[in-house]
Image (spheres, helix red, strand yellow):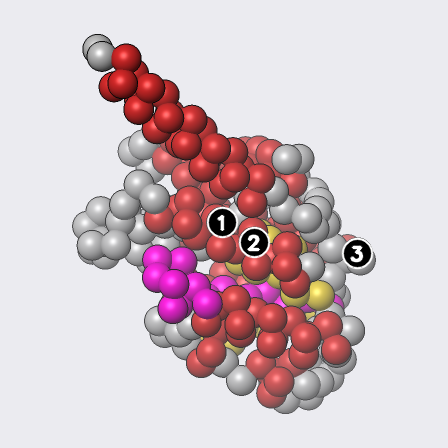
Amino acid sequence: MQPRAISALNSLLLTAALLLAAVAQAATPAVKAPADTPKRVLFVGNSYFYYNASLHFHARRVALAADPAWAKPFIYKSSTIAAAPLAHHNIEHLITPGNIGVKDPFDMVILQGNSTDALSEKSHASFREKAIEFNKLITGRGAMTALYMPPAHVKPSKRAGPDMMRKTEDMYVSVGNEIGALVIPTGLAFEEAYRRRPDIKLHQEYDGSHPTLLGTLLGAYTVYAALYGKSPVGNDYNFHQLIAAEDAAFLQQVADDTVKKFFGR
């Protein structure tokens, strides 16, 4: 190889290393845990939340199974619109006490945008703008904001690609850090589960986007670990006994490991 070619290659490698370092730094979450134990939690998102009897349903029952006396007073609510970005939600109405059947203010509001928001500058900017706006209203009511990082698509989704998860991760963590929100690393848990068990089915086979029941359970375990700082390993919640014990144990360990690694950065 000619010296000029070697120099060009070294320059490219250095540029790539610097880009990777910048991404790694941007992906460091500033908020490691909620200030207090959230008892009234609102999920605001789209079909990723309402598939499989709803993420909030499973997340509350995971908490209840972990400690019935501790979790029983918890109220989880969910407001979802299919394929919705944050801009489609009337957040002020949702968080006003009494409007959706919860008389006291929420402690935590978990926001999820459209799964493809990170893939264009326009949708990325809209997500950031609405997250800032919503966070101001949420914290004005005395609650804390969390951002639910969704998983990347897989085949047969036309959006599936090697960079989708990195772009999503960077967007959620950078916006979360900007507004002081807790980031729930569900997308990273999906990625880790597939790394350990490529055969596991966490996405619906017909679209490679929406979660299967196993995917929703992984989301619930990740929410539990991130919100309460407790490990879901050994949790005995099982939705109508539809989950094989070995699958539940695997997903619990993945959620626990992912959350610890994410907040330990």
Discs 2/3, front: 2
Residue found at the very far front of the displayed protein = 4
Q: How many marks?
A: 3
Give the distance between the C-alpha atoms of the residues marked 3 and 1, in whole angstroms: 24 Å
Q: Are marks 3 and 1 in contact (CB under 8 Å)?
A: no
x then y, percent, for residue 99? 63, 88
Placement of 24 over or under 152, stated as above or below: above
x then y, percent, for residue 238? 50, 48
Q: Are marks 1 and 2 in contact (CB under 8 Å)?
A: yes
Q: Tell me what residue is drawn at x 49 percent, y 49 percent.
A: 170
Q: Nearer the viewer, residue 8 or 66?
A: 8
Q: Nearer the viewer, residue 33 or 21?
A: 21
Residue 35, labelled with which disc? 3
- The residue under label 2 is 174
Placement of 17 over or under 48, stated as above or below: above
Asked whether residue 150 appears in the rendered view, the answer is yes
Residue 251 relative to residue 204: left or right: right
Reading the chain from its start, which is encountered first: label 3 or label 1?
3
- Identity of the amino acid at label 1? Asp
- The residue under label 1 is 170
Asked whether residue 240 appears in the rendered view, the answer is no
Magenta residues (range): 107-125
Q: Secondary structure at mark 2?
A: helix
x then y, percent, for residue 207? 23, 56
In the rendered image, residue 208 lying in the magenta stretch gets the answer: no
Q: Tell me what residue is drawn at x 40 percent, y 31 percent.
A: 16
